[in-house]
Image (cartoon, helix red, strand yellow):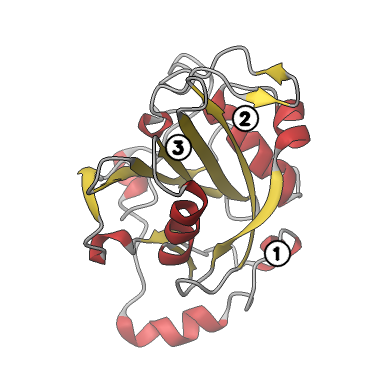
Amino acid sequence: MNRTRSLRVTAIAILALTTLPLSGCLFSSIPSEAPSAEEPISTPSPSEEATVEEPADDESEETYSDVPATLSFADGALLPDSTYIEWADGLMFDDGWEITTPDTGNGTWGYTTTDGTCTASFWQGTLDGLTPTGDDSADTDAVIAFFLDAEVADVTAAATNTELSYQVGGAGGLDARSIGGQQDDDARTWSMTARAFGHVGAGVYTLVDCTGGDFDATVAEVIAQNAIAAY
């Protein structure tokens, strides 16, 4: 999957969320779309997108050796400038999930559990329009705030530190930020987990949304099976 999705484009994974409880306050509105294209956020042209290439098999070992063994927020600054960041899609091999929103090359896709109770949506893209601060934690909060149409300060106050799988599913080792809540009289529970890599201008998130089942177990399953690959 190509890392071609910028912050400008419609965030189809938001799934029509409406409000987010934040310790007694609310984000005013969480739309089904990201902010409009009129905002001054650039998108790579097709020719620019086409320049991103995955390494050949015989180059993989050398390329992986150039990135840190773990990716704390501080370690993001150690990534080589040419580092490619993407999700390693593990749900495609799980019979309990079916793809319901295929990736058409724009950096978003989504799955639904076969019983219909949960969805897992993914985004990977560039940070066009976001000026990196040098702090991947702060930049991650900015990415979350963008997609939830929220204030960064509110996200920072409500989000918690967590980990995503790094290079190998179930491995952990990649610092991330997570935020979530319940709505529709607690009938729906959702959680967004994201990471920005300011040094290389990339970002990712996954959003899990459930109306039944074991929500915590579903989130853990999604994070365990879908690692972030950096090379």
Q: Tell me: residue 7, above or below residue 49.
A: above
Residue at which label 1 appears: 72
The quadrant of the image that shows the N terminus is bottom left
Mark 1 against mark 3, which lies toward the viewer? 1
Q: Give the residue displayed 35% in from the left and 67% down from the top.
A: 54
User: Is 134 displayed left or right of 147 in the figure?
Assistant: right
Q: On residue 145, which mark appears?
A: 2
Q: Quadrant of residue 44?
A: top left
Tell me where residue 132 appears, x and y as whole percent. Answer: 69, 42
Q: Earlier in the sequence, mark 3 or mark 2?
A: 3
Q: Which amino acid does label 2 sit on?
A: Ala
Secondary element type, mark 2: helix
Residue where numbered disc 3 is placed: 6
Question: Viewed as shown, does residue 160 lie left or right of 193?
Answer: right
Q: Report whether 147 appears left or right of 163.
A: left
Quick one: SS at disc 3? loop
Q: Which amino acid does label 3 sit on?
A: Ser
The structure residue drawn at horizontal position 26% and vertical position 63%, both measured from the top left corner, is 94
Q: Earlier in the sequence, mark 1 or mark 2?
A: 1
Residue 24 x %, y %: 75, 20
- Going from the N terminus, do you reach mark 1 or mark 3 first? 3
Which residue shows up at 77% across the image and 28% down it?
153
Give, as a three-letter code, the residue at label 1. Ser
In the figure, 118 relative to 31: above or below? below
| Image x and y of residue 150, in percent | 63, 22
Residue at the image position 47 percent from the left and 65 percent from the top? 224
Q: How far apart are marks 3 and 2 (CA)?
A: 15 Å
